[in-house]
Amino acid sequence: MFYYDIENFINDNGITAPGSGLGSDCLYNIDHFKLYGAEVEATIRLGGRFRATAAYVYQEFDAEKTSFEKNWTYYLPALLPKHKVKLLARYKVWEGGWFQLSSRYVGTRNAQKGSKLDDYITADVGFEQEFKFHGMDYTAKVFVNNVTGADYEEIAGYEMPKYLWGFQFGVKF
């Protein structure tokens, strides 16, 4: 469970004055802001090869009204989704080699300038190999994010890539 009770919450607000077409980045205070909800997470291991994690977040807000709750403003508290779900499964293929599948659901939410963003689900796939070389620990990863090619926006007006391919290499000193 979580509960934030904030006085003088600073709202970073992009305002376009109605009818003028002029925009600015503006900060203003919300006198009293509350964010509350619950998060639950569970992890399971089956033998030495399989691991899975599931997490769910529910959140709500309550904010005192200001004169800035217009369709032409960004109202940050209302941009938070009420529901989020994350799933992760890892399977150990061989020593130090993990196949990974993950998924994320984000519920509908308000967006800037009075519009709504649809809920979305993404799925990611990857493989990770850990190894030692000259006494140091290394990790090499390959992955594809949004493997299903879902159309979605995390922020209104910014479409996320259909597919994101990547390679990552890390070393521990």
Image (spheres, grey):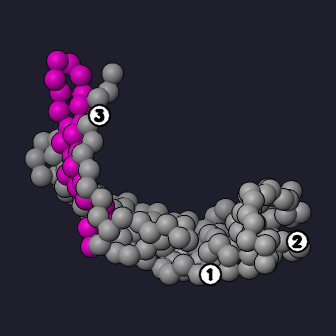
Q: In this view, does 160 lie to the left or right of 90?
A: right
Instruction: Name the kind of residue labelled 2 in the image.
Output: Thr
The furthest residue to the top = 134
Element carrying mark 2: loop
Q: Residue 66 carries which label?
A: 2
Q: Residue 115 carries which label?
A: 1
* Dots 2, 1 in contact, CB < 8 A: no
Q: How crowded is mark 1: few (under 14 residues within 10 Å), some or many (20 or more)?
A: few
Residue annotated with mark 3:
170
Q: Residues within 10 Å of mark 2 (few under 14, many from 20)?
A: few
- Write down the region rendered in magenta: 126-148
How far, Cα to Cα, is label 2 from label 1?
19 Å
Question: Which one is closest to the eye, mark 2 or mark 1?
Answer: 1
Q: Is residue 44 left or right of residue 18?
A: left
How far, Cα to Cα, is label 3 from label 1?
41 Å
Percent x, y of residue 153? 47, 71
Q: Is residue 87 left or right of residue 128?
A: right
Q: Nearer the N terminus, badge 3 or badge 2?
A: 2
Element carrying mark 3: strand
Percent x, y of residue 120? 43, 77
Which residue is depicted at the point 48% across and 79% down? Answer: 119
Q: Nearer the viewer, residue 163 or 51?
A: 163
Element carrying mark 1: loop
Q: Nearer the N terminus, badge 3 or badge 1?
A: 1
Q: Is the magenta stretch mostly helix, strand or loop?
A: strand
Which residue is depicted at the point 16% across and 46% down? Answer: 97
